[in-house]
Image (cartoon, rainbow, N blue to C red):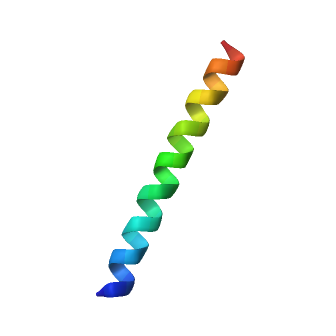
Amino acid sequence: MKNHKFLVKVLRITAAVLAMAAQVLLACVG
């Protein structure tokens, strides 16, 4: 159960980082 929660947290952080990177990329391109 602990491992599952950790995995979900990692996925959330990864998604947040990807979203931030996408925004920066769009800002640079635009």
How many marks overall?
0
The x and y percentages for residue 21 are 61, 38
Reply above or below: 25 against 10: above
Task: Estimate the x, y position of residue 2 in percent, counting from the top left.
Answer: 33, 86
On screen, residue 28 versus residue 14, left or right, reads right
**In percent of the image, x 66 and y 12: which residue is there?**
30
Find residue 26 and report its image quarter. Answer: top right
* Left or right of 13, for residue 27: right
Compared with 29, 11 (above or below) is below
- Residue at left offset 33%, top offset 76%: 5
Residue 29, x across and y down, in percent: 70, 17
**x and y percentages locating residue 17 in the rendered image:** 54, 47
Q: Residue at x 47, y 50 (%)?
A: 15
Side of 2 relative to 27 (left or right): left
Horizontally, residue 30 falls left or right of residue 12, namely right
Q: Is residue 9 above or below residue 18?
A: below
Please say if 21 is above or below 9: above
Quadrant where the N terminus sits is: bottom left
Q: Residue furthest top?
A: 30
Looking at the image, which residue sits at the far left?
A: 1
Q: Residue drawn at (56%, 29%), measured in percent from left and top?
A: 23
